[in-house]
Image: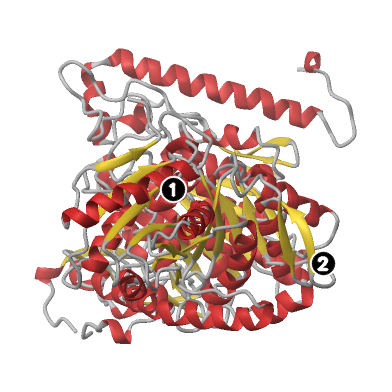
Amino acid sequence: MINESKTMMALTGNDAVAAAMGQIDPDVVPAYPITPQTELMHKFADYVHDGLVKTEFVLVESEHSAMSAAVGASAAGARVMTATSANGLALMWEILYIAASTRCPLVMAVVNRALSGPINIHCDHSDSMGARDSGWIQLHSETSQEAYDNTVQAMRIAEHPDIKLPVMVCLDGFILSHTLEPVEILGDKAVSGFVGEHKPVHNLLDLTHPKTFGPLDFHDYYFEHKVPQMIAMKKAHGVIAEVGKEFSKLTGREYHLAEGYRTDDAERIIVALGSTTGTGKQVVDDLREKGEKVGMVKIRMFRPFPYEEVRHMLSGAKAVGVLDRSASFGATGGPVMLEIKAALYGESTVPIKNYIYGLGGRDITETHIAGVFEELKDLASSGRSSDDVGLLGVRE
Amino acid sequence: MMSASSVCGNRRKAMPSIKELSKREDLLSGGHRACAGCGATIVARQVMLAAGKNTVVGCATGCLEVVTTIFPFTAWKVPYIHNAFENVASTISGVEAAYQSLKRQGKIKENINFIAFGGDGGTYDIGLQALSGAAERGHKMLYVCYDNEAYMNTGIQRSGATPFGAATSTCPAGDEIPGKKQFHKDMTKIMIAHRIPYVASASPSHWNDLVKKVEKALSKDGPSFINVISPCHRGWRYPMEDTISIAKLAVDTCFWPLFEHDEGRWKLTYKPKEKLPISTWLEKQGRFSHFAGHPEMTDKAQEEVDRRWNELLALVKIGDLCEEGKHCDLKDL
Amino acid sequence: MKEKGWKDLAIGGLIEDAGNAACYETGSWRTFRPIRDNEKCIQCLQCWIFCPDSAITVEDGKVGPIDLAHCKGCGICAAVCPPKAHAIQMVRESDIEDKE
């Protein structure tokens, strides 16, 4: 037993996600260490070695093998979870696509960290952004509470009969993973009740109806095999919203695809995801005190992207600043910027500017964000978007 | 002629006769797209006859995988999974872990064999890490390497298993450099170094020995590895009907000795009546045809065959001298 | 086999019909056909154990007809047939009249 009844605890993000994993009690967890995910797996290892979970813990020799074993175990009908960061995720990259196309309902915590090079162990979103086309659902967390809540919901989402896709729960490395925050941990029964009994998508171990997984497609079938994945992704909008509603009934905490923080009458709006949205909320509140009409769109579900919701939240804005914690070299802006532009295309000509921040764990402060809101005043009055990408906090 | 099983009455220890084997269901159907005369599919058929229906197969990307599973067709009559090129060992690790977990929870009752097939490319090279990890972790699985000594499916490129001097697409017998410069890895010994319960080398030409080894491997409560020579007439350049005789010659020249390492003990399972010179094997294959103009290469090849063979004989002798529980001294050799 | 559209495909790219490769007739690949003289055959089953295509049929421990729908004509069976039996000949397909 991990936790008998709902308790408020001081936990790091890693421990909170580990607790969720422990309460879900998956059949198999393959794991390989990488900072800043490591303590998550240390905690889970304690559960395993103390006999608190039934999980078969497979300490593989690389992340590539972690994801490979995860696909194998999922195909065999097991409930499977794992976790990684940065280059570990990059090493899994090949298999991420296979996990999604094989429709394995895996749940993986990605403790966001910058991709090398140079090698850097601190937070940015280049890792999960690099996997945005892989076919995985991606959820971001503002706080360790959200990381815990997202993990519990992720299993329901992944295994939903309309979905059957793997889900990545992202939490900022060090900022959330290693910092103590108050987190309400549900009781074990509440979690297992919410997640439900595992109804496997696949059963490779069925000897009476042998199936072949992972065939070779020539050009006559590959395309057809991709379409159902696209459809499942589309259905994820509805399912994630539905699961969020159900979860809020259980906990009183609201979970939507995106959150419009004081955006209803906002003239200047920023868009962000991850822990920065917590700082963003503070800045919005402070500026609102001074009478400034500002707001923030917090993206929770990055894949699939909530275009409709975001469009609606930005509809009244006179200027938009999009914050990206990763770059997309050669593109007009970072990944979030590209999505926002796509959301607004044909619907709105609101002036918009991209700000890249926090790469390699560079701190983002209230001063930076307040500075963005200040700049947005000029953008609003000029009525024109800026093609320049602001680089927050970088030394020239 | 009485079969071994009717003499012993103990099916586990008895080796099925060919007649008994022929009554078993072929678990690889016809209609796969392997080249006519392909060694790999003979290996797969023989392994599956030994393993039986209660088996889940994993396959690395490569000839065997490609030819047997072109959508919408599959030649496999047992559950089968292909994931990627370098990870059949870790994929089957995951399958086996799931099986152990579900069995412990009472959700599965049957005994199931887990067999991972990989070519030499997917085993000696890109798949070495995953195989090594799986072996170290102790999963109850058998890994069969069908060694055709190059990346055949992509057009005969050299691998860590390609023998010294062989011509391949990426190390052709050119005017400056005559074929592969390096000797091949001793993969079987690499797996023995992992201290897993059972490791062996085998050949489809010696089906009896191969079947016995597969059965022994599957009876172990841990990882096992069998390296099987798998002649490929496209890459080796010999007439397609000679696949089995070329395999037999590899064994009789001691290029591919048949041995096993069972619970720590080295044992030769077949000793050729006469150890034939390596030249008799080389001259049968087009990939070594340039050796005719480079006799020093044949000498070098023979030297290495002899070195590995003598080393094996020494290790086997230690095994002979050291019976169970008895301390053994190198000076006894 | 008519090609299926995405709506009719099994989830995750799976093939659910084990062993259906048997529907694919590789017999058309042959240039040479193995012809076995049953009088000379000593039932050693070597041809059966060494066929890459499971094309030597066996029934109750005895070799039966060669599965011509799948036999690729590689000639291994003829090559492994013991010299004292010499029961299998490889005959050019184009020379065979009365093909079934």
Q: Which mark is residue B315?
A: none
Q: Residue furthest front?
A: A290
Q: Is residue B157 left or right of residue A163?
A: left
- Residue B307 picture location, percent across and down: 53, 19
Q: Is residue B272 left or right of residue A128?
A: right
Q: CA distance from mark 2 to mark 1?
A: 31 Å
Name the one closer to the observer, B25 or C5: C5
How was the colour assigned to the protein in this rendering? secondary structure
The disc, 2 or 1, on the residue closer to the chain's N-terminal end is 2
- Residue B60 picture location, percent across and down: 44, 54
Q: Amino acid at mark 1?
A: His
Can residue A80 be seen at all in this image of the molecule? Answer: no
> Which element is circle 2 on?
loop
Q: Is residue B52 left or right of residue B219?
A: left
Q: Amino acid at mark 2?
A: Asn
Q: Is residue A227 left or right of residue B108?
A: left
- Residue B131 picture location, percent across and down: 56, 44
Name the one closer to the observer, B159 or A141: A141
| Disc 1: which residue | A125
Could you say which quadrant of the image residue B38 lies in? bottom left
Q: Which mark is residue A3?
A: 2
> Which element is circle 1 on?
loop
Name the one closer to the observer, A69 or C68: A69
Name the one closer to the observer, B303 or A167: A167
Q: How many numbered marks appear?
A: 2
Could you say which quadrant of the image residue A346 lies in? bottom left
